Amino acid sequence: LAKKIYNHGVIVDHFPCRAWVSLPHDYSYNNKLPLLKYVAKQVLSSLKSEGHQEINPDASNRIDEAHDILKKSRYLLVLDNISTRYEWSTLKAAFPLSTSSGSRILLTTRNPEVASQVDSDSPPHQLRRLTKEESWQLFSQVVHIPPKGKMLAKEILSKCE
């Protein structure tokens, strides 16, 4: 859902700067600086791939550079897979968010505690689990299962609960 929003034509036109940052599932940030450096590099790389050629994601001062670029523009920053309140509070403090400029941060998380801390004016949108039938339809559309493989596919799908 977040990816669809991020890539929607209206969003692309509305936000001159867009950046998508996914935090690794298996990494624990117990120190602020590595987290900020990682996210700043991802922001700069994302902005460069969006056409901002003047950006150097490997600059030594990339935290400041990312902050300065975003401060000057209306931006959409997607922070994907924020798993702890510590990560969210660190990142929230690091990025300029002036709602008067129209900038927005969209956060994805599986942690309800993180989701509840994001914005008291805007309740989190919770995705519901797909039913078995919906899961099968989605799986079938994406994988294009031959008739002989349907039993195996249903067995695989049953493991995804």
Image (cartoon, rainbow, N blue to C red):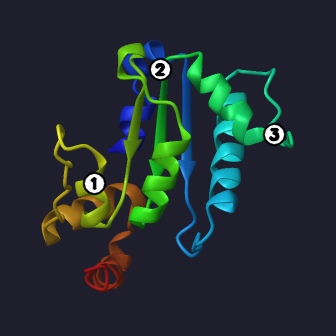
| Residue count near mark 2 (Cα–Cα under 10 Å), binned few <14, some 14–19, many ≥20 | some
CA gap between label 1 and label 3 equals 29 Å
Q: Mark on residue 117?
A: 1
In this rendering, the answer to whether 73 lies above or below 5 is above
Quarter occupied by residue 146: bottom left
Residue position marked by numbered label 3 in the rendering: 61
**Relative height, residue 156 to residue 101 (above, below):** below
Q: Earlier in the sequence, mark 1 or mark 3?
A: 3
> Is residue 25 left or right of 49 when viewed as pictured?
left
- Residue topped by disc 2: 12
Label ID, residue 159? none
Residue at the (26%, 83%) spot, across then down: 158
Q: Are marks 3 and 2 in contact (CB under 8 Å)?
A: no
Where's the N terminus, which quadrant? top left
Nearer to us in this view, 152 or 67: 67
Q: Secondary structure at mark 2?
A: helix
**Residue 45 figure quarter:** top right
Q: Amino acid at mark 1?
A: Gln
Amino acid on which the number 3 mark rests in the picture: Asn
